[in-house]
């Protein structure tokens, strides 16, 4: 049984790409199209790891992360940022994100990063 991923991105193309890539690898993939939807879904879906977009209309990735951390402090998070958003990355690091990728990311690199993050942090996937 694979780990459960929650993909959060306002762009449908990104959600679709990540759904297909990780579903194919045997992960259970849940999708959220906004920060608010992510906050709502975390408690019901209980993902092992979240792939969180930074720039989204309404509640952005940092704000969503703040909310999620209030109820689920242990969930693993990989951020997806645009090039040059180093201040946002630093802020997200303070909130305990494990890794980040810069868009446009290489899907194989992201696959490897998810596997590595799970292996390092969840004993059952090691
Ligand atoms: Mg976005």
Image (cartoon, rainbow, N blue to C red):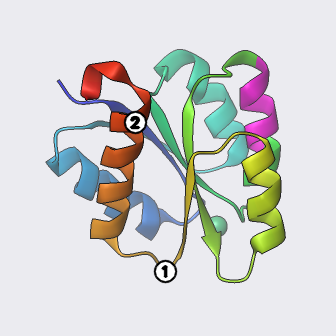
Is 118 within the magenta? no
Residue at point 62%, 37% (across, down): 38
Q: Position of residue 37 (x, y in %)?
A: 64, 38
* Front disc: 2 or 1: 2
Image quadrant occupied by the C terminus: top left
When the figure is inspected, residue 28 is found, relative to residue 16, above or below; the finding is above
Q: Position of residue 5 (x, y in %)?
A: 40, 37
Image quadrant occupied by the N terminus: top left
Q: What segment carries the magenta color? A: 64-70
When the figure is inspected, residue 85 is found, relative to residue 35, above or below; the finding is below
Q: CA distance from mark 2 to mark 1?
A: 25 Å
Mark 2 crowdedness (10 Å alpha carbons): few <14, some 14-19, many ≥20: few
Q: Please give the residue where the numbered disc 2 appears in the rendered image.
A: 120
Q: Please give the residue where the numbered disc 1 appears in the rendered image.
A: 104
Q: Position of residue 34 (x, y in %)?
A: 66, 49
Secondary-structure class at tag 2: helix
The foreground one among 22 and 122 is 122
The foreground one among 27 and 100 is 100
Q: Position of residue 35 (x, y in %)?
A: 70, 45
Displayed quadrant of residue 125: top left
Residue at point 57%, 46% (across, down): 98
Quadrant holding ligand 1? bottom right
When the figure is inspected, residue 26 is found, relative to residue 21, above or below; the finding is above
Q: Main secondary structure of the magenta part?
A: helix
Q: Is residue 101 visible?
A: yes
Residue at point 32%, 52% (across, down): 19
Secondary-structure class at tag 1: loop
| Residue 66 horizontal side relative to residue 36, left or right | right
Residue 16: mark in rendering: none
Is 68 within the magenta? yes
């Amino acid at each position: 049984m694979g780990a459960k991923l929650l993909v959060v991105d306002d762009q449908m193309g990104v959600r679709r790409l990540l759904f297909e890539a990780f579903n194919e690898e045997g992960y259970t993939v849940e999708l959220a199209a906004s920060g608010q939807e992510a906050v709502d879904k975390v408690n019901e879906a209980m993902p092992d790891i979240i792939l969180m977009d930074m720039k989204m209309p309404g509640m952005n990735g940092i704000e969503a992360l703040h909310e999620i951390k209030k109820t689920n402090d242990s969930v693993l998070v990989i951020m997806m940022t645009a090039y040059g958003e180093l201040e946002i990355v630093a802020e997200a690091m303070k909130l305990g994100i494990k890794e980040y990728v810069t868009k446009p990311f290489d899907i194989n690199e992201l696959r490897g990063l998810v596997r590595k993050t799970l292996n390092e942090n969840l004993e059952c996937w090691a």
